Structure formats: structure tokens, C-alpha cells
């Protein structure tokens, strides 16, 4: 393996991510500090998506999407500045409460341990002995997990259903009791989660089950570390915090976030141009086969994540119509998440092998489209002039066969009656 193939740059997002109010908050928090602006932006996106609540929805087919976003900030210990990335958002929340506490969501920073503990934060009321415990009317809950490794540890315990509960929260499903003896119940939850973890903890603790059961791919995973070294970082001026809080309040007032009992009262839509742009991305990048099973599983929800991000960015412009700039800014986040997942879960050497397989796959697909069909030996001799190893060609064919939908198919063709031998495998484009 050449030296170039085993070294790579850390992922860095495009500035398009810092759209509108999200960008203002990010730049204010990173000005004169070591904190990565994109990490601040991700935390603010998660906070704002929680504060907006379930009143806003975007219908896609039979699914109604709400602004529920889970974000996982990945960075090395001491370099990620993961704790600093949430501090400005907490200050904005405090200023928002002073302006009008009704618009601010509930915040939980104590760490999650079980489904029952999560439900207890937003329950529908229950009886304790002779006492009736009143329901929590406001179902908006922003969970800040500065040690997300704790959530992964809990998921490894026998009988713990926290990860399943969080999956339901992302979907907006009612949280029902896990056992007959526990009658806690939470309807219409609106939970958004900001987590932080080091790459070594993430790869060591996340289980194969969580990689494939839809838990991990509900998180927008982003790599973000400090941008500079400053021994004496500056504090964001109070006037700036208050200005950002007022702008946040404008967004929340626009969606009537203080009316907790109202659900699905504000319908969003995509403009014709945004529909065209989204369809273009959906047929390409959003469903692109990345060539690695783990990475593919982690990126399976790119399309709904893009829609939720685009919804939020449109609302920061105080409009219910999603336009092309909102789609493009949301797609910039998806691209950064894709690069971050690759960087954390695939080594540089494996990344180079994947790139080779994808390149060979494209050549095979183009060859079959032009020729109509070909045997394995014809692909080797005519497409690659016999210069590509058999293992690489087989990996490329397997990649094309396993794509969803399949890009090629293989059929057994009998040899002519006067020709001895077993049937021949013929590959054809779909």
C-alpha cells in the first residue's frame, strides 16, 4: 500500500452548513475561542429542533416528519472541546427563558439509564399509592449526554431497553411500559438528543446490534475538534447572547411553540425547485452504495435526516416553504456526516480498497451497458485487459449485485449441446 493510500485528512464540513441563524450562533460561539463552530451549530440545531415541538410537520408519502434531530459530536478527548460546544446554547436557552419561559423546552443533563427513567421525564401521569401524580404537559425534552459512552454502556446490559426507547423517540412513537408492573406511559414525545463521545469509545462500545438495528443511524454523527489553540478564550458578550435569544424566540413564536397541546397544526411543503433538487439527490448521493456494510448501515437514514434539517433551516427564515438553499445547506451536513462516519469506522487502508472496488464497479457497469452481457472471463479480458486481479473483479461484481436496487444480475446459461462443460455465468445490466 502506498504512503498516499494510508494517510488522509480529517473531515471538514463546507461552510454552507452555517446557514442563517444557525451560522450566527456558531460564529458567535467560536469567535475568540477554541470551540469548533460546526459543533456549536450542531448542538443549536438539536436544541432548536426540540424547542419547535410537534406542531410543525412535513408530509412525505404517508409519513409526517417532525423536527426531531439526534446529533453525536465525535472528537478526541481534550481536542474535541465537546463540553464547550454546548455552553453557548445553554446561555441562549437561559436568555430565552428570561424573555418568555413558555417557549423553552425541558432540559435533561443527568444522564440516561433506562426506558423507565426516560418516560418519567415526560409521563402522562400515574398513581403513586393514594396520590395522583399529574402529567407532564410539555413533551419537549432536550437531552444533553456529554458522556454518550454511558448510553452505549447501558445498552450492553441484559434487559436494558434504553436504545429501543430512543429509537421510538426519534420516530415520535408513544413510549409504552416495558413491563406489566410498570405503568408509566408517555404519549407524543418530542425528544432531541445532543451526545458527545471520543472515536475510540464509540468504536469500542457500540455493538453490532446497534449498528444494524437502526439505533446508530438515527444520529447525525459529526467529527469536530478545536480549530485553534488559545490559552485565554473570550466570553461571548451578553448582548450577543440576548440578541440570538430574541431571534430564537421569533422562530418559536412563528411556529407557536408555546402551545404544547397543539400538534400538527403547521404544514410545511417543498417548493417545486426544492422538490426537483431533493429528487436529484435522492436518486444519487442519498441512496449511494458506499461499499462498506457498516458505513452503509450507519448512513441509511440520510434522506429523512436531510428533510428534517431542511425543515429547521426554512423555519429559521420564518417560512413554511422549503427552498433550494435549505436543501443544499442540509445536504452539506449530510455530506459531513458521511465523511465523519467513514473517517471513524473505516481505516485509511480499507478506504483505499473501497475506492478501488467502487471504481472497478463503475467500469464493469459501463462495460456491460455497452456490450449487453458478458461472462466473468470476458469481463476480465475485455474490460480490464487481464490486468486486474480476480479478487478485485469479484468484489466489484458482488458490489453491483448487492446494490439496492441491483445494478446487474447473473444468470446461468447452458452451453451448446455439442460443447461439454457446466453452464456459464453471464452478467447483464439491470
Image (spheres, helix red, strand yellow):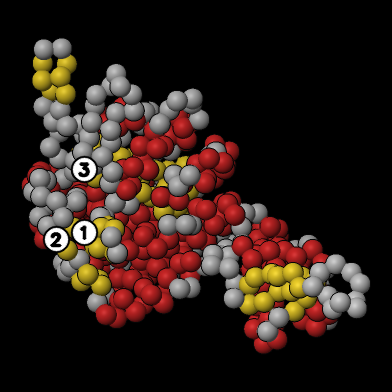
Report x, y in % for residue 348.
Answer: 66, 58
- 280 versus 346 height, above or below: below
* First-in-chain label (3 vs 2): 3
Tell me the quadrant of the picture where the C terminus can be found. bottom right
On residue 266, the disc is 2
Query: Could you say whether the residue bearing mark 2 is in a helix, strand or loop?
Result: strand
* First-in-chain label (1 vs 2): 1
Q: Residues within 10 Å of mark 1 (few under 14, many from 20)?
A: many
Report x, y in % for residue 15.
Answer: 39, 69
| Residue at mark 3 | 188
Query: Could you say whether the residue bearing mark 3 is in a helix, strand or loop?
Result: loop
Give the Cα distance between marks 3 and 1.
13 Å
The residue depicted at 45 percent of the width and 25 percent of the height is: 159
| Residue at mark 1 | 57
Report x, y in % for residue 295.
Answer: 56, 55
- Which residue is nearer to you in this view: 158 or 410? 410
Amino acid at each position: 500500500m502506498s504512503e498516499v493510500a494510508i494517510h488522509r485528512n480529517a473531515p471538514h464540513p463546507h461552510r454552507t452548513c452555517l446557514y442563517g441563524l444557525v451560522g450566527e450562533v456558531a460564529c458567535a460561539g467560536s469567535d475568540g475561542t477554541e470551540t469548533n463552530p460546526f459543533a456549536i451549530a450542531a448542538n443549536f440545531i438539536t436544541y432548536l429542533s426540540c424547542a419547535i415541538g410537534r406542531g410543525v410537520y412535513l408530509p412525505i408519502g404517508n409519513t409526517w416528519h417532525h423536527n426531531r434531530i439526534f446529533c453525536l459530536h465525535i472528537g478526541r478527548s481534550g481536542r474535541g472541546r465537546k463540553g464547550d460546544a454546548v455552553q453557548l446554547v445553554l446561555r441562549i436557552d437561559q436568555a430565552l427563558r428570561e424573555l418568555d419561559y413558555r417557549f423553552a423546552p425541558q432540559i435533561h443533563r443527568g444522564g440516561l439509564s433506562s426506558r423507565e427513567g426516560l418516560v418519567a421525564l415526560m409521563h402522562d401521569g400515574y398513581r403513586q399509592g393514594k396520590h395522583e401524580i399529574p402529567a407532564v404537559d410539555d413533551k419537549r425534552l432536550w437531552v444533553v449526554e456529554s458522556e454518550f459512552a454511558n448510553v452505549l454502556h447501558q445498552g450492553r446490559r441484559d434487559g436494558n431497553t434504553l436504545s429501543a426507547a430512543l429509537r421510538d423517540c426519534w420516530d415520535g412513537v408513544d413510549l409504552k411500559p416495558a413491563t406489566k408492573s410498570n405503568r408509566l406511559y408517555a404519549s407524543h414525545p418530542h425528544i432531541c438528543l445532543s451526545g458527545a463521545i471520543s472515536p475510540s469509545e464509540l468504536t469500542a462500545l457500540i455493538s453490532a446490534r446497534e449498528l444494524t438495528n437502526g439505533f446508530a443511524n438515527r444520529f447525525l454523527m459529526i467529527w469536530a475538534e478545536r480549530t485553534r489553540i488559545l490559552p485565554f478564550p473570550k466570553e461571548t458578550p451578553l448582548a450577543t447572547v440576548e440578541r440570538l435569544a430574541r431571534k430564537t424566540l421569533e422562530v418559536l413564536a412563528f411556529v407557536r411553540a408555546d402551545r404544547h397541546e397543539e400538534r400538527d397544526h403547521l404544514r410545511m411543503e417543498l417548493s417545486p425547485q426544492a422538490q426537483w433538487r431533493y429528487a436529484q439527490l435522492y436518486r444519487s448521493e442519498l441512496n449511494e452504495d458506499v461499499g462498506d456494510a457498516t458505513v452503509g448501515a450507519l448512513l441509511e437514514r440520510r434522506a429523512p435526516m436531510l428533510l428534517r434539517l431542511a425543515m429547521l433551516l426554512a423555519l429559521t427564515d420564518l417560512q413554511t416553504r422549503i427552498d433550494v438553499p435549505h436543501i443544499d445547506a442540509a445536504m452539506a451536513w449530510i455530506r459531513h456526516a458521511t465523511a465523519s462516519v467513514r473517517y471513524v469506522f473505516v481505516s485509511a487502508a480499507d478506504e483505499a480498497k473501497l475506492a478501488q472496488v467502487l471504481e472497478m464497479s463503475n467500469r464493469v457497469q459501463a462495460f456491460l451497458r455497452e456490450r449487453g452481457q458478458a461472462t466473468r472471463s470476458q469481463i476480465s479480458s475485455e474490460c480490464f485487459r487481464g490486468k486486474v486481479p480476480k479478487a478485485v473483479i469479484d468484489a466489484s461484481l458482488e458490489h453491483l449485485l448487492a446494490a439496492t436496487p441491483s445494478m446487474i444480475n447473473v444468470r446461468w446459461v447452458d452451453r451448446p449441446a455439442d460443447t461439454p462443460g457446466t453452464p456459464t455465468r453471464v452478467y447483464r445490466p439491470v
